[in-house]
Amino acid sequence: MTDTNPLLTMLDGTGLPPFANIRPEHAEPAIDQLIAESRTAVEQSAAAAEQADWDRVVAPLEAAEDRLSRAFAPVRHLHSVMDSPEWRAAFDACLPKLTAFHTELGQHRGLFDAVTAIAEGDEYARLNENQRKVVDDARRNFRLSGVALEGANRERFAEIAQRLSSLSNRFQQNLLDATQAWTRHVTDAGELAGLPQSARDLLAQNAASKDLDGWLLTLDAPSFMVVNTYAENRELRRDIYTAFSTRASDQGPQAGEFDNSALMDEILALRHEQAGLLGYDNYAAYSLATKMARDANEVESFLQDLAKRTHPLAERELAELTEFARERDGLEQLEAWDVGYYMDQLRQARYQLSAEDLRPYFPASRVIDGLFGVVERLYGVRVETDTGIETWHPDVTAYVIREPDGSDRGYFYLDPYAREGKRGGAWMDECRVRRRVGDTVQLPVAFLTCNFTPPVDGADARLTHDEVLTLFHEFGHGLHHLLTRIDYAEISGINGVEWDAVELPSQFMENWCWERAALDLFARHADSGEPLPDELFQRMQASRHFMAGWMMLRQVEFSLFDLRLHRDVDPDHGVDVQSTLNAVRREVSVLQPPAFNRFAHGFGHIFAGGYAAGYYSYKWAEVLSADAFAAFEETDLFDRDTGRRFLTEILERGGSRPALDSFKAFRGREPAIEPLLRQNGLVEDAA
């Protein structure tokens, strides 16, 4: 098995994952072997404490961990995008072994002593700036991993880490299962009144894939969104809203079947206990130890300030929406399942603009090429298709990023469309990190995953403007990973970057989706090839701040909920998830959702992702991204000098220095909040 295991053979040289050959049964044997090799490397590095230097301690450990990471990356990814009982079993078999190894690594006294010897000895002065950052971060991470714990506390910390890993995995699997379990088969076209033809075609394709006539509604994002936005049938909107907002919970049509309630309670309790073992008052304080924000009070003040600035605008928006629904349809009470529909109807009435009006001008292939054109103008790199790289699905395309001289700089896979067995949402994940290996450089590789409206009947998919924004956002993360110049894996690309700054490059890229000069590169009619008409562009610009207060408060609500969930824990009774959410909604929201809403049960960002006590990062980083884009507004949208400075001071620097230092090196000053307020149409309210 070992000699022919593709997860091991790909580690020779610079090979990429041979997806055509990788099978679930390859995962566990490969991970077992690589964990054993890594343990040997750990012991050898720890044994070098008396003669501790970079080459004896850090370099061999980085190499071993890189091999393990590269082998597990395709396993983790295929589990997310091609889920099956076999891949789920393979992932579940590997995860506890990897968690145990990394917990063991973080608590290894001998290795900690060896790293400390480097940091406190003559070797530290001989290291370069980036190597020192690796050593400094490693010492901090050892402390946060419980290296100083003794006896029962040490064992308990390891038990908690193992259990949390399992619980988060089960949370995500329950959410996927609940999403896929609900469908509604429609055979009466009248039920779909209001849906545009593109939406009907998508739902008909869903049905045909199951050998059904008519139309099939699902909870996948493209299906849910079109019904929520366009369906005139209020009961249909209520039904799909109810199913979506109660996924994996004790409420709704699948009540209790995939319920995440007990998992959430245990996750929160274990996080609080874990933080306490390390001397922190709560998990929020523990989480913020590696972020830009100083403490939870600073985060709460930041969020409350945004809420205060935004609330008057959001109240006016709700009043206008409520009055519009009353005048148009005699609706006496606006409910949560009405908001999306009447927002679109009001947008059309006010700006003569619907999301469907823009869709013909965003054929997926042209949007993707236009995105690459924007990047080439900003940073001087070219993106080209590489048909020689294997992928895991026909929807997936592999690309190479090339320097102006034609040399390769990195590779990525783009998997754009929703399908069965694929986790919802959009994300960038590492396949391989940049690092120096002797005289050569291992080039970075990324996975870029979205869940856009898929093509219908073989035609080019047509995206909404929101989907275009998402594509640019995720590619911003990808550029952060792919364009780094740092040669050490621990601080290469997004690694080592404070979590509340990691959204800076992604949110920054979204700005070009609103600019005429950028849109002219790709916004052309799918059939005629005509550019986006200026009259339509002007309507799009006029509607940019439509319901901006509502959207801002929504993010503030999620962020405050996350923060308080991990900070305000009663020593005797823990924290009640729904009560905490309800309290935040009463404080922040302008429209209360129905009592059955179970948003938290699908909040994978904090229960199954890396955003626990850190969801505020989206708004925190948006201050940075808006101010960074203002530098281009002050010069030119494609100013090469400004683009080069963003490339060299932020994207290329990765986690080699504090994010605030990188921002100041680019902008020449501390970040300002005014550009964020201006982008969100809040300047008058702020004043």
Image (tube, rainbow, N blue to C red):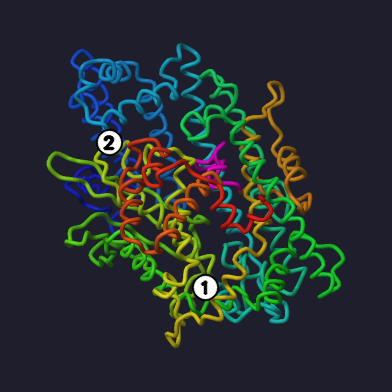
Which of disc 2 and disc 1 is earlier in sequence? 2
- In this picture, residue 536 sits left or right of residue 461: right
Asked whether residue 273 is drawn in magenta, I would say no
The tag on residue 527 is none
Residue type highlighted by circle 1: Ser
Q: What residue does disc 2 label?
A: 34
The Cα atoms of the two marked residues, 1 and 2, are separated by: 40 Å
Residue 250: % across, % down: 71, 46
Residue type highlighted by circle 2: Leu
Q: Kindly identify the residue that appears in the image at 49 percent across and 71 percent down.
A: 454
Residue 448: % across, % down: 40, 57
Image height of 57 relative to 264, above or below? above
Q: SS of the residue at dot 2? A: helix
Q: Quadrant of residue 117?
A: top left
Q: Kindly identify the residue that appears in the image at 58 percent across and 23 percent down.
A: 273
Asked if residue 412 shows in the view, the reply is: yes
Image height of 473 relative to 564, above or below? below
By secondary structure, the bulk of the magenta-drawn segment is best described as loop
